[in-house]
Image (spheres, rainbow, N blue to C red):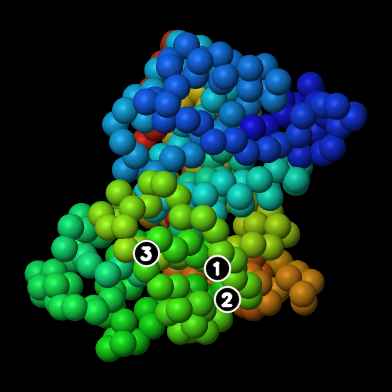
């Protein structure tokens, strides 16, 4: 929940006493809250705070997604962004906390909302499972399905940044991030010893934290015997440098600054720039950075790789043409397309 610019001072800055600042809330499941109560709750949040950025796994139950779009459509609000993320539940929570950290910087609501998709490319998430027999979120081979019936077998399954499955005790630790991260883990009925031991050492995480297992984790991983984990950037300065390194555009409808190809608040696409014949691939320009921060910046990224101490390169969206008024206001419940490829 983010304060509106001009109402509570610059976004992310502490305003006068008594005025709300950026914070996080959990919206309730449709079976736990009637539609009338959900409408009143969200309307009060928008009135009090200004903007609402809603994150949820892309695989959330259809009833949850339908409720979110219904609330947004009934309220006819372009200050409520609905952002499905292709990540497990714990990783979505990690990104929510990263956005809360970014809200302390001088960034607008449009940039913060669209930054959620950017951050998914810097999350390493998975789980330790006792069985993969019913897992359908991550590709699993027939042989792994058969081995999962062996008593005592345990598997480490990575869902992001790319699917991977290893058998604990036989296969090496899967490759981890090439930049400084913190590791969050949440245990159901599975042991967290491998996560806090071999995985944390192999990924060279800077800090570890235990969290309650999200209620959606067991259905997502198709088993209650799960220990979910997610590693992401925890340094607010590195996060702000990462977002600041991306070229911004201004939404032609609501006027907010955004990154990417679409405003997630009003669903207006960014007009494409003029086509250039055979353009050269963009390269990041190295920028000096304090030594303490340079140790936490991603060092090995696809395509353009800056020298150590530079912010992680991010593909730049095409330059915006002159802002043009769209022929009609986008529908409040318009579906949001998949994010553009970044550094792939």
Is residue 12 in view? Answer: yes
What residue is drawn where x is 31% and y is 82%?
168
Q: Nearer the viewer, residue 256 or 221?
A: 221
Q: Which quarter of the image is occupied by the N terminus?
A: top right
Mark in the foreground, 2 or 3: 3
Q: Position of residue 339 (x, y in %)?
A: 41, 44
Q: Secondary structure at mark 3?
A: loop
Residue shown at the point (49%, 73%) measured from the top left? 177
Q: Secondary structure at mark 2?
A: loop
On residue 189, the disc is: 3
| Image quadrant occupied by the C terminus | bottom left
Local secondary structure at mark 1 = strand
The structure residue drawn at horizontal position 51% and vertical position 55%, both measured from the top left corner, is 212
C-alpha distance separating marks 3 and 1: 19 Å
According to the picture, the residue beneath numbered tag 2 turns out to be 205
Residue where numbered disc 1 is placed: 183
The span from disc 2 to disc 1 (Cα, nearest Å) is 6 Å
Relative to 130, 210 lies left or right: right
The x and y percentages for residue 90 are 46, 54
């Amino acid at each position: 929940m983010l304060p509106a610019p001009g109402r509570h001072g610059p976004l992310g800055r502490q305003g006068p006493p008594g005025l709300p600042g950026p914070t996080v809330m959990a919206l309730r499941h449709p079976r736990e809250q009637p539609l009338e109560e959900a409408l009143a709750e969200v309307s009060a949040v928008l009135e009090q705070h200004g903007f609402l950025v809603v994150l949820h796994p892309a695989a959330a139950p259809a009833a949850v997604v339908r409720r979110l779009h219904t609330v947004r459509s009934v309220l006819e609000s372009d200050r409520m962004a609905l952002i499905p993320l292709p990540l497990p539940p714990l990783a979505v929570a990690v990104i929510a906390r990263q956005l809360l950290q970014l809200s302390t910087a001088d960034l607008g609501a449009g940039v913060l909302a669209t930054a959620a998709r950017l951050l998914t490319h810097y999350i390493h998430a998975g789980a330790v499972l006792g069985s993969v027999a019913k897992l359908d979120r991550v590709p699993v081979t027939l042989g792994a399905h058969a081995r999962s019936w062996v008593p005592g077998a345990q598997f480490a399954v990575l869902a992001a940044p790319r699917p991977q499955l290893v058998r604990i005790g036989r296969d090496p630790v899967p490759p981890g991030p090439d930049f400084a991260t913190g590791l969050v883990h949440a245990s159901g009925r599975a042991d967290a010893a491998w996560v806090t031991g071999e995985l944390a050492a192999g990924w060279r995480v800077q800090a570890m934290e235990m969290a309650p297992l999200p209620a959606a984790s067991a259905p997502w991983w198709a088993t209650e015997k799960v220990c979910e984990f997610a590693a992401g950037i925890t340094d607010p300065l590195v996060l702000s440098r990462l977002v600041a390194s991306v070229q911004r555009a201004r939404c032609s409808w609501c006027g907010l600054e955004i990154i990417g190809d679409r405003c997630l608040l009003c669903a207006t696409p960014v007009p494409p720039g003029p086509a250039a014949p055979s353009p050269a691939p963009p390269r990041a320009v190295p920028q000096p950075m304090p030594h303490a921060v340079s140790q936490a910046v991603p060092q090995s990224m696809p395509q353009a790789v800056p020298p150590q101490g530079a912010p992680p390169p991010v593909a730049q969206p095409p330059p915006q043409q002159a802002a043009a008024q769209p022929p009609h206001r986008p529908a409040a419940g318009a579906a949001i397309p998949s994010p553009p490829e970044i550094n792939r």
